[in-house]
Amino acid sequence: MKKAEPLAAVTKHPTVRDVAKSANVGASTVSRFLRGLTVRRQAAGRIQAAIRDLGYTPNETARSLRGGQSRTIGIVLPKVSNTFFSAATQMMEEEARRHGWSVILLTHQDRMEQQQEHLLTLRRFRADGVLLVAAPGSKMEDIRAILPGVPVVAFDSFLSPEIDSVLLRNREAARIATEHLLSHGYERITCVGGKPEVYSIRERIAGYTDAVSAAHARPELIVAADYEQLRYMLGAAVRSKKRPGAILSLSDFATLHTLTTFDEVGVPRDQCIPLIGFDDFPYAALVDPPLTVIRQPVEKMARYALSALFRRIKGDEQEEIQEISLPGELVLRRSCGCA
């Protein structure tokens, strides 16, 4: 009698038991890890690696049947003292609450370990989605290992082509601002900023470099790892015989420290170095002279990011990944030399 051909192997999704076997731990330990509870560090590392290698994702249908949505989203960003982030967060929270959702706000101070701790916290509280301003050096596979199956939208910094992102056209904005300073005829236009490892700062440096190189000028950068060091370096440049002819400041913090440096060095108000900064903070128009700035479309960026996240939470997995990049607005005041 002819033997029956073996049935084709049925491809199945990896389970908690598969992860446990691969990580050499018990299924209950994997379950604890997935719920954000404490497990031994060595075990946690093996579980993360197994989840990544097996491509494990939780059964979202079962999860919903067990407890339904938490109607909570996480917002993870570097700091709220930054005027752009504070405004964006307030808008996101108000919009989320209007739709009956709660927000957990966490700040990582550009530290990877702190970001990972916060993502674990969001998993423990069963957040349905996360808006993430990623810390420098973040990798999507690490975030997926901590938040398997949870929608993530990148805000203000590009993270991965695998997820939606909402960004300012940083490179374009910096180029436009630099070109405006060049149009005044200034020489030795200097780019001033901190934390060059941050995505937005890196892109703005590139835009500045594009503009000065196109004008056959030499890029002059004063970029430091922290803002105290930035003030020291800028102060030395301002005191030198070849002080900057104009300054492009790459963030509100850089602008604040630039103005503080002017005061410390004793630059007279009528001899201030022409300046354009990023972000239109509340008192920018009241500074003497009033500050020319690149204004970010914070309301649109916040609204688009939240809309993208809610769309993914609802299960719109088939929709194409979007990278939404919005232009900045050059707001002309007197600090750049305009009347």
Image (spheres, rainbow, N blue to C red):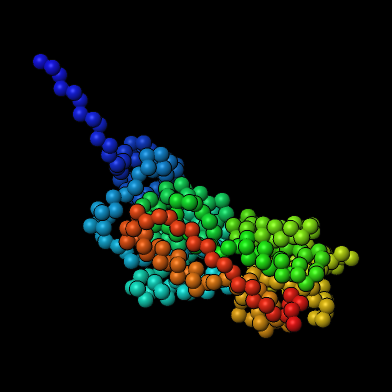
Q: Identify the residue shown where x is 25% and y is 31%.
A: 9
The extreme top residue here reads 1
Residue 206 seen in render: yes
Q: Identify the residue shown where x is 49% and y is 71%.
A: 300
Q: Identify the residue shown where x is 45% and y is 67%.
A: 304
Q: Position of residue 21 (x, y in %)?
A: 33, 36
The extreme right residue here reads 241
In the rendered structure, the answer to whether residue 222 lies left or right of residue 3 reads right
Please determine whether, in this image, residue 19 is positioned above or below residue 212: above
Q: Position of residue 24 (x, y in %)?
A: 36, 36
Please determine whether, in this image, residue 199 is positioned above or below residue 99: above
Q: How many marks?
A: 0
Q: Position of residue 113 (x, y in %)?
A: 53, 53
Image quadrant in which the N terminus is located:
top left
**Among the 4 quarters of the image, the one containing residue 186:** bottom right
In the rendered structure, the answer to whether residue 117 lies left or right of residue 227 reads left
In the rendered structure, the answer to whether residue 291 lies left or right of residue 319 reads right
The extreme bottom residue here reads 286
Q: Nearer the viewer, residue 164 or 282?
A: 164
Q: Position of residue 330 (x, y in %)?
A: 64, 73
Residue 252 seen in render: no
Q: Identify the residue shown where x is 48% and y is 69%.
A: 302
Image quadrant in which the C terminus is located:
bottom right
